[in-house]
Structures are given as structure tokens and as C-alpha cells.
Amino acid sequence: MYLFKRVDQLREFLSSARTNNRTVGFIPTMGALHDGHLSLIKRSLAENQVTVASIFVNPTQFNEASDLQKYPRTPGKDLELLAKVGCTVAFLPEVSDMYPPGLDTSLSLDFGGLDQSMEGEKRPGHFDGVAQVVKRLLDIVSPEFLYMGQKDYQQQLIVRSMVQQLNISTTVITVPTVREADGLAMSSRNVRLTPELREGATILHQTLEGAREKLSQGESIDRIEKWAIQALSQPKFQPEYFTIANADTLQPIPANDPLPERIVACTAVWADDVRLIDNLMLAGQL
Ligand code: PAF
């Protein structure tokens, strides 16, 4: 596996690697890699000749300094995992190279409401930071395919919208969430859960599954959302939101309207001081 820490080194490598119609698949990460990330990398390896994974804890997408500081960092282990799955290139840039003085990386995009609810509402500025770093990384890597995880459902819609608005020639592929045996979505934050919280955290997936069942039985969305908030309110667990929405626009579904073909439920829950998110398609495919 090649390891690059500087933008110019990676660019030089890719310009020579890109010959003979080879395609490049790219997976942006913030490290603390787990099987969820590895599933994106394996998918890219199966579909491209060159797979680039970046590890960069992007300061501009954290709206709370303490969250940035507490974010798990395990670069040694991450590199081992990437090498083991056969990733072609690991890219670990410095902040100064990603955001060099004089380079304007700001964006002014209209996400058509995709960024207004849920994570966008609870973490002001978060999606501006995500769009900024993903745009910068796409400028550097210019991949044919960009692999994003379903676990951050709203994020992958925002990135799709950015790619479309800026007419970037990359195809975004969303890869299904990888779960632990008991249903908990894999997340870099899971390592911060105590054994007790880890056990209780299955409530997120159970509640999402419960919501899917209730919707299929004709229960109203409003009642399901209220039921879910109650179900998630357990000792040491505090739901921030449980939202059922149109899976393409993330707009709420009015009570008397026919149901859209694709419906998603998304939730964020505090497990003590660890913030967990998860989602499930309640109708239609990913
Ligand atoms: O999902 C993440 O880990 C980050 O938001 C991303 C896409 C790597 C951008 O920093």
C-alpha cells in the first residue's frame, strides 16, 4: 500500500496510475476505521483498479471543540487495516495542506432544505464543513467513484447534491450500513460506550425496526415518531430526534398525503455523553 501525506505527492502518483482506462475509487474517512469503512473500501476494490482512502479529522465540520478533541484517533491501527484489505493508497494529509492560506475552499450551495433538519439543525455548520472537505478531497483525488456510507444518510444526500450542483464528474455510491450481530450500526464512536451503554445501544436499531413494522401496519407517521421517542427514552439514553421523512428530499410527509415510494427514518440518541446516529429505509430501497 502507498502512503501519502502531501497533496502534491498523491496527485503525482494518481496522474501516473490513471493510465489505460483505470478507474479510481475514493473513500473519505476520519479514521478510527471499522468494518463499516472496510465494506466501502472492499466495494471500491472490487469495482476499480485504484482505491484511495483518506484519513483526515476535518476540523471545519465539528461545531463543538470538545467533540473534535474527543474524536477517536487510531492512525497506526487504521493503516494496518487498510493494508490488510489491500487498499491501494492511504492519504493522511495535514490541516495546513488541506486548507493552505490563500486557497479559498469556501462554498456557497443551496441544498434545497436537505441540510435544514436533523443533523443540520442540531449541528449548525456541520454540513458546510462536510461539503467543504469533500469538495477539496474530490479536487485532489478526482475519483471516478466516490463511496459513502448509508449510516450518515443525510450526509450522503448532501454530498450527492453538491456533486450535482458543482457538476463534478464523479459517481456517488451509497453502501449499506454494516451492523454488529445485535443490530448496532458500526461507528467510530462505539468504542466510547461502556459495556452497559453498549448493551443498551441496541435500542436504536430495535426502534427503527419497530417503526418499519408499524408503518407497514398502517400506523400514522406522527404516532410512530411519538412512540419511537418514548421507546428511545431509557435510563442513560436521551433521544435528540426520531424523524420519518421522504427519503429523497428529507421533507416531512404530510398526514393526509399519499406515502412516497421511498421513506427513511433517521435518529440521533445520546448514550450518556456519546452521540449515536442510525437510520433505516421504512419503504423502498436504498
Ligand atoms: O463521514 C465522515 O467520516 C466525514 O464526514 C467525511 C465524509 C470523511 C468528511 O470529513
Image (cartoon, grey):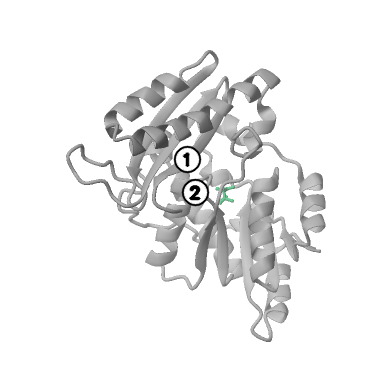
Q: How many marks?
A: 2
Name the spot of residue 101 as percent of width and height, x first. 58, 57
Q: Amino acid at mark 1?
A: Asn
Q: Residues within 10 Å of mark 1 (few under 14, many from 20)?
A: many
Name the spot of residue 286 as percent of width and height, x first. 46, 53
Name the spot of residue 135 as percent of width and height, x first. 51, 61
Q: Residue at 64% of width from left, 84% of height from top?
A: 21
Residue located farthest toward the bottom when viewing the structure as drawn? 20
Q: Determine if residue 55 is in view.
A: no
Q: Residue at 34% of width from left, 29% of height from top?
A: 224
Q: In the rendered view of the protein, which quadrant contains the N terminus?
A: bottom right
Respond yes or no on whether mark 2 lies under 8 Å from ligand 1: yes
153 vs 222: above or below: below
Q: Which residue is mark 2?
A: 129
Q: Determine if residue 199 is in view.
A: yes
- Looking at the rendered structure, the secondary structure element under dot 1 is strand
Q: Which residue is mark 1?
A: 279
Question: Would residue 6 appear left or right of 23 to someone viewing this image?
Answer: right
Q: Amino acid at mark 2?
A: Gly
Name the quadrant containing residue 257: top left
230 vs 16: above or below: above
The numbered mark at residue 91 is none
